[in-house]
Every structure is written in structure tokens, then in C-alpha cells.
Amino acid sequence: MGVEAVMALLEATPDTPACVVSLSGNQAIRLPLMECVQVTKDVTTAMAEGRFEDAIKLRGKSFENNWNTYKLLAHVHPPDVKSNINVAILNVGAPCAGMNAAVRSAVRIGIIQGHNMLAVHDGFEGLAQGLIDPITWAGVGGWTGKGGSMLGTKRVLPGKNLEDISLNIAKFNIHALVIIGGFEAFVGGLELVNAREKYEELCIPLVVIPATVSNNIPGSDFSIGADTALNTITATCDRIKQSAAGTKRRVFIIETMGGYCGYLATMAGMAAGADAAYIYEDHFNIHDLEVNVEHLVEKMKTTVKRGLILRNENCSSNYTTDFIFNLYSEEGKGIFDCRKNVLGHMQQGGTPTPFDRNFGTKMGAKSVLWLTAKLKECYRHGRIFANNPDSACLLGMKKRSMVFTPLAELKEQTDFEHRIPKSQWWLSLRPLLKVLAKYKVKIETEHAHLEHIIRKTGDFPKTA
């Protein structure tokens, strides 16, 4: 937002209206100041006149969605008529903070819709072995604030066990699946879709909710758990930097998680004020390492006597954390000394952050509401039959909205070898790292255009 504000000033002419820079989804946007003031006044007026529906609409879509989800989950209103639909929920991949919040809201929304909810333990392996129990409203009480995965999670893919999985889907009469997890959940979902031709039992609607600290799933800008991991990494970097406060000239080299995805290293680098963040997507060579070392040597002559270097675990098979540590130690002899830290599993974080709790809750609720609508579409001759590509989707956050994308479509956008999407929005933020570390680089970020909020919020009075 700070960068966007400076850009707005540099681009402004004497005729440009005053603007407010704000954040919508993961995008910095510009809004006319007068319109913002007008809408704020309209909210106050609507509240004073008791027009609460209008006040909620004026506060924006995100506020309205949060309010509606809260109302759905706040009180138990089980329907009089049961739907006789069985929806199974499973966690797949590495555990992450926020998974339980998604399970809780999915279970409760399902019960409100009249469905029977089933909990599958230990991912696809549990589905193959029949580790499936009914789960009740009270069974998920207090899950929002719990880290990790209460259902149990495994990285096993369904490929080898398709026969057993299809038998158990028939045995437990499962009509729909909610798969919450990381890259394995996405790949597993795809495998189930591809096996529909062979196993008729797999012709049921399914939805994948991205939940992984790596944030490496196509079709979604954010995944549940990444925010908690970022908080943990940033807090740890701050503590590590603090250990050198005062006297020592020291450079810290910190290795972060994320597989081949450099999201955590980049974002933590921006938040913790790193001098460099090495990632797989942004190729670097010995020359870049040399430039960074020289930069740090110069930095040590100033008042700031410490440096911070982040390295994603799989950014390079040859430039390992040890190699970079040895290089910096050698080049910095007599000028600074080095320390290295591999953060490890601590990064998964303990309890989920408020963002991950809310995000998980919204994703869980939205996925079950979508499944309910899909089940009605797919109900033919007294049974559920879904074999269209759009009956197996991934629910993701794209810029400002939650979108359901068919898994088959996402196949094209994925680098399966490195388990990352082919294009990632946060790469355009990388130049900021350099600018903030005082490198002389040109900044090429996407500039936001002035948007109008009066038009967005419906038929409310236009400003003069």
C-alpha cells in the first residue's frame, strides 16, 4: 500500500482527484477520497435511521459475506426434514493451522442443510481402510482455535487404493466429498476425477479446499495456513535479528519451508526486512550472491550492523544453506561473521491466526453450500451421478473473490514436477524487497487504476 501511495503521487496531475489507497483481497487499489467519505457518511445515516440491511451493504461485500457466514454458524437451526445425503470430509497432506476451522464450519453448515456429515481419518488412506465415523455439531466444538489436523492427515495419494476407496464410498453411501489439504489434496482430487470412467462410485461431486503453509496450489492466491506460518517465520526472524542488536556485526542466513514455492521466503523477507531472499522461481547465480555479499559489506560500514538473508529450502540443489553460509563467512572475514538457522517444522505455527480461522471458516461454509447446489443438479432417477468436469472443483481466492474452478482446468496451470502453479501473483512484489534493502533497481509493479465505490455498492446516491 505504501508503494501504491507513492506511485499514485508520482502519477498525479493537478487535475487528479484525491484518492485513498486501500487493500482489496491481495490487491492494492485506489479509491476517490470524496466517495469514501460519502459512503462512510451514508453508513452512519443508515445506522441512525435503522436501515441495517443498507448499512451492511454499504460496508462492502466482504463484510456482508462475513456477517452471513456468522449468522449461519452462530445458532443451531437443524432443518425439520433430513436430506439423506452423506457428505464426507478428509484432510490430506501436511497438517497446517486453520484446517480444523474449515472442517468445523463445513460440518456445521452441512448439518444445517440437513445432511449427515462423515469424518474420514488419515486422508485417502483412511478412506480406503474405512476409517469413517459420523461427526456431530458438538463433535467439532472448539476446533476453530486448534492448530494441526484433528481428523489426522496423510500424504498418501488415492492412486493405489482406488478399488478400496470406491468400495467404501458405496459401503458408507457417500454422496459428496470435501477434501481439505495441500498439493496432495489437489493431485488426489484429480486422480479421483480421472478414475471416474472406471469406477462409477467416484461420480460424485467433490470440492478441494487449499490448506498448506507453502501456498503452492493453483487456482487460489492464498491457502489456509500460510498466514500462520508467515507470522511464525517473521516473529522468529525478528528474534534472531535482535540477538545481534547493539555491538555485533553479524549476518543471519535463515532457511524457510515451502518446497519449491518461494512464497514464504519472499513475504517473510518483506515483513522482516531481509537483505535478500533466494527462491526457486527467481533464478539466481554466483554473480547475484557476489553482489549481495558486496552490498552487505557496504552496509556494515553504516549504522546498521546486521544483515538477514532468507533462503527457500529447494531454491537450488547446489547453492545450499551451507554453501551460502560458507561463502558469506569467507567473504565477510574481518567485516562480519555469519550464523545460520534452519527453521524446520516450527514454521507450521501453533494456533491459527485470526485470518486463517476466518478464511478456513468461510471456505468450509462456501464449499458445502456449493456441494448442496451441485447435488441437486446431479440428482437423477433417485441417485446422485456427477461426471461433468465442473462437479469436481477447487475453491480458491482469486484477487477479490472466492471462485470454484474445475480441477481439470487447473491441470494446465500447474508445474507438477515442482508442485507449483505456473504463474504466481506475488512474484511482482519481489522488486520491493530490493528497493527496501537499498538496492538501486527500477520498480515495475502493476499500477492500480482509480476505481469508484459508489457504483460497486449498488444504487446508492452519487456524490456531487
Image (cartoon, grey):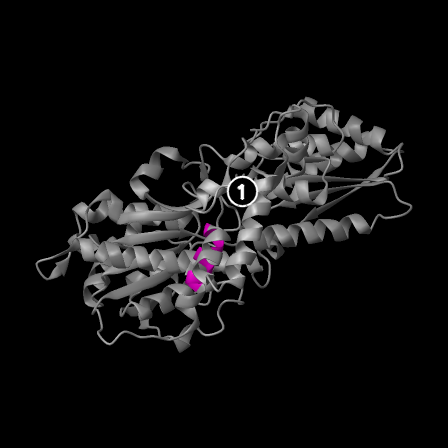
The C terminus lies in which quarter of the figure?
top right
Observer-nearest residue: 77 or 344? 77
Which residue is at a point 22% across and 57% down the rendered structure image?
375
Q: Is residue 409 left or right of residue 302?
A: left
Q: Main secondary structure of the magenta part?
A: helix
Q: Position of residue 189 (x, y in %)?
A: 32, 49
Q: Position of residue 25 (x, y in %)?
A: 51, 45
Q: Is residue 389 above or below residue 296?
A: below
Q: Is residue 109 left or right of residue 456?
A: left
Q: Is residue 401 above or below residue 417?
A: below
Q: Quadrant of residue 75?
A: bottom left
Q: Is residue 306 visible?
A: yes
Q: Position of residue 14 (x, y in %)?
A: 67, 24
The question of residue 464 being in magenta is answered with no
Residues rendered magenta in the picture? 61-69
Q: Position of residue 93 (x, y in %)?
A: 44, 54
Which residue is disc 1 drawn over? 26
Q: Is residue 271 above or below residue 417?
A: below
Which residue is at a point 20% across and 66% down the rendered structure image?
173
Which residue is at a point 13% across and 60% down the rendered structure image?
383
The N terminus lies in which quarter of the figure?
top right
The total of numbered circles placed on residues is 1
Disc 1 crowd, CA 10 A, few/some/many (<14, 14-19, 20+): some
Observer-nearest residue: 83 or 121? 83
Observer-nearest residue: 324 or 135? 135
Which residue is at a point 30% across and 49% down the rendered structure image?
159
Dot 1 amino acid type: Asn
Q: Quadrant of residue 293?
A: top right
